[in-house]
Image (tube, rainbow, N blue to C red):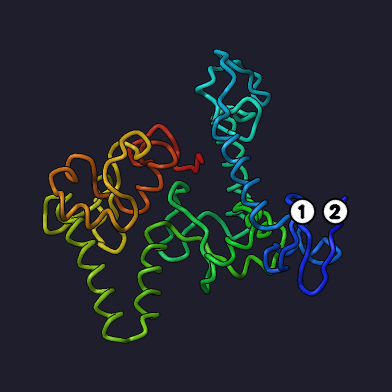
Amino acid sequence: MTLNYSIQNHKDCSACSRCLPVAEFSKNSRSPDGLHAHCKECDRSRVKARYYELSQRTAIPSADKVCPMCSERKLCAEFPVRRSSKSGLGSYCKNCHRRLNRAFKMKLWAALGGPSCARCSESGLDFLTLEHKNGGGKLHRMEASSWRSIYKEIIRDMESRSLYEVLCMNCNAAKSFETLERSRSGTKKSILHHGQRVRLKAEALRIVHGSQSPTCTCCGHGVVAELCLDHVIPYSQDPVGPRGFKMYGWVVEYPDDAKAHLQVLCFNCNQSKGVGLSCAHQRPDSPLIPLH
């Protein structure tokens, strides 16, 4: 039997039985030697095998399923996909899942002083998001296990609440733009690069909107920094063109295709559409509530 040991900066991998430098092992604070039992290569192989297994898993071919929360028997299409489960479906139906998340989000907004944007006082819950006051959100998200763990920390800990604020998506985008303006190094190259990105986005918005003053197709908002491009049909159903910032260059290069598949939305309406498949402004029978 091969034993794990660390001698002269080497260690035996318990999976492949090779003696490798300790740099080939990930750190593990629970282990006596501070390292994982398996080398990084074996860990990667295990993760890839597990990911492939989950990707091949499909839902049980049954016509319906009972939701344990509402006790109703519904079609499998009414349940969210969850590959980590044996059935390939979530436990609760989509409506119950939304209710649970809605109640959780309401606790979060209440802990932060109520559901209202700190800048513009927007109170539509479909449009609100959580924002770090002094930056550092990307690093925090990488360290946290999930968004839900961050939300729970804010609800429980008074000190954590002082680090966050509630913003609508439009104000969040404007804040990001302002931060980028302030953080530029001031070199000629960085200023030129930033200016090119701003001009490219503005040109793409004008092409898709068909006018020199683009506005949100849904609500008419017209601040360029708070506008974005959105696929009329969800990208998962109609994967046309690239995603992210590369989309703006694609619009300039292929304007006819872009006009047929894209629309201009503000960040508020874009998020609301992603939550409920249509913007809250177009759902007058439904209150402005988060459904994700």
Q: In the image, what residue type sits under mark 2?
A: Thr
Task: Give the structural element (helix, strand or loop) at label 2.
Answer: loop
> Which residue is outermost to the top?
63
Rendered view: 136 above or below 96: below
- Does 96 sit left or right of 274 as displayed? right
Seen from the viewer's position, the closer of residues 107 and 16 is 16
Give the residue pinned by disc 1.
Answer: 17
Residue at image location 52% in from the left, 54% down from the top: 115
**Label 1, label 2: how far apart the Cα atoms are:** 7 Å
Q: In the image, what residue type sits under mark 1?
A: Ser
**Pointers 1 and 2 in contact (CB under 8 A)?**
yes
Image quarter of residue 223 = bottom left
Give the residue pinned by disc 2.
Answer: 2
Image quarter of residue 22 = bottom right
Rendered location of residue 232, percent (x, y)? 28, 39
Task: Give the structural element (helix, strand or loop) at label 1.
Answer: loop
Label number found at residue 127: none
Rendered location of residue 74, percent (x, y)? 56, 17
Seen from the viewer's position, the closer of residues 223 and 244 is 244
Rendered location of residue 52, percent (x, y)? 57, 37
Residue at image location 40% in from the left, 32% down from the top: 285
Lower sequence index among marks 1 and 2: 2
Rendered view: 80 above or below 62: below
